[in-house]
Image (spheres, helix red, strand yellow):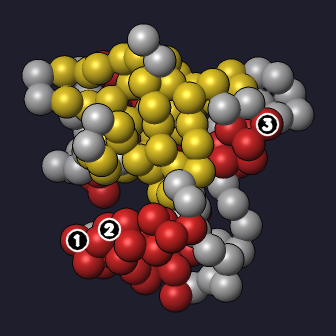
Amino acid sequence: MSDWNDKIIKEFREHNGVVGGSFAGAHLLLLTTVGAKSGEKRTSPMMYFPNGDTRIVVASKSGADTHPHWYHNLMKNSEVHVEASVEGGIEEYDAVASVMPENLRVVKYAEIGAANPGFAEYQTKTDRKIPIVVLNRVD
């Protein structure tokens, strides 16, 4: 875990889901996965996007040519834990992560990129198709 991530996670939890800096005003969540190799729990902060009854996250890694570690983790174990910033605090729940099918991903990524130009730019930096992951709540 990077110091940068650790600081965001700490701020998120200490300030009831509110974070400043580059995440100020964004929908933010902490995604906890199980390490594909280590078997240890790993928590990653990221923006999320409401999508009907679910939330989605983008495995952009800022346009790098490789997927983020958290994405590899959920490919091995799709059971995740979510702490999402919502109005009035943090909503916490378990979820099952699944990769959005390509025909839906193309449309949704275009929508996300139009509303958040940084994500559109990320796709121009790499030849890989940046996955979108759907977080389906487990009741």
Alpha-carbon distance for marks 1 and 2?
A: 5 Å
| Relative to 32, residue 5 above or below | below
Query: 82 or 99, which is in the foreground?
Result: 99
Q: Position of residue 111 (x, y in %)?
A: 29, 71
Secondary element under disc 1, as helix, strand or loop, is helix
Res 112 label:
2
Res 115 label:
1
The amino acid marked with disc number 3 is Lys
Residue highlighted by disc 3? 76
Left/right of residue 1 with respect to residue 27 in the rendered view = right
Mark 2 Cα within 10 Å, few/some/many (few <14, many 20+)? some
Nearer-N-terminus badge (3/2) = 3
Res 34 label:
none
Q: Position of residue 27 (x, y in %)?
A: 26, 45
Query: 41 or 92, which is in the foreground?
Result: 92
The amino acid marked with disc number 2 is Ile
